[in-house]
Image: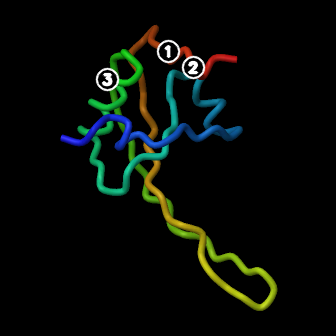
C-alpha cells in the first residue's frame, strides 16, 4: 500500500467546500489512481478520525489560453470525505 501522504495530496478550500465543513464533509485532492478504500484508510491514518463515507469526483481539465497559445489545466481527482458524527479535523478550523 502507498503512504497516506502520497494518496491525500492537499485540502481544497473553496466557498462550497468551506460550507460543507459545517456538515462534517472535508474536500481533498487525491492521487489519480487512488480508490475510495485507500482514501478512507489514508484520512483515518493522517487525521485520526472515523470516516463514514467517501465520494470521489474526476475533475476534467479546463481549456486555457494565453495570447495565441492554447492548452489545458491539469486534471485531478477530488474526494469529499464525510466524517462520523462529532468528528472534525482540527487543522481546518478557523
Tag 2 near tag 3, CB within 8 Å: no
The residue that appears at 49% across and 15% down in the rendered structure is 88
Along the line of sight, which residue is nearer the eye, 34 or 19?
Answer: 34
- Which image quarter is the C terminus in? top right
Secondary structure beneath dot 1 equals loop
Residue pointed to by mark 1: 88
Q: Alpha carbon of mark 1 to alpha carbon of mark 2: how far?
A: 9 Å
Question: Tag 2: Cα neighbours inside 10 Å, few (<14), some, or many (≥20)?
Answer: few
Disc 1 vs disc 3: which is toward the camera?
3
Q: Is residue 34 left or right of residue 46?
A: left
Residue drawn at x 42%, y 32% as measured from the top left: 81
Image: 10 above or below 72:
above
In which quadrant is the N terminus drawn? top left
> Which one is nearer the viewer's eye here, 2 or 93?
2
Q: Which residue is mark 3?
A: 45
- Residue extending farthest top: 86
Residue 48 x, y percent position in the rendering: 37, 15
> Residue 22: x percent and y percent?
60, 21
Residue with the mark numbered 2: 91
Percent position of residue 73, x then y: 60, 69
SS label for mark 3:
helix
Instruction: Identify the residue at horizontal 41%, vertical 20% (top origin).
Output: 47
- Tell me: residue 24, above or below residue 79: above
Amino acid at each position: 500500500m502507498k503512504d497516506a501522504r502520497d494518496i491525500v495530496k492537499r485540502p481544497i478550500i473553496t466557498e462550497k467546500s468551506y460550507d460543507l465543513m459545517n456538515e462534517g464533509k472535508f474536500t481533498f485532492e487525491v492521487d489519480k489512481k487512488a480508490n475510495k478504500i485507500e482514501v478512507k484508510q489514508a484520512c483515518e491514518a493522517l487525521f485520526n478520525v472515523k470516516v463514514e463515507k467517501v465520494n470521489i469526483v474526476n475533475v476534467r481539465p479546463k481549456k486555457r489560453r494565453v495570447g495565441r497559445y492554447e492548452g489545458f489545466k491539469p486534471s485531478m481527482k477530488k474526494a469529499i470525505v464525510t466524517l462520523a458524527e462529532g468528528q472534525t479535523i482540527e487543522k481546518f478550523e478557523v
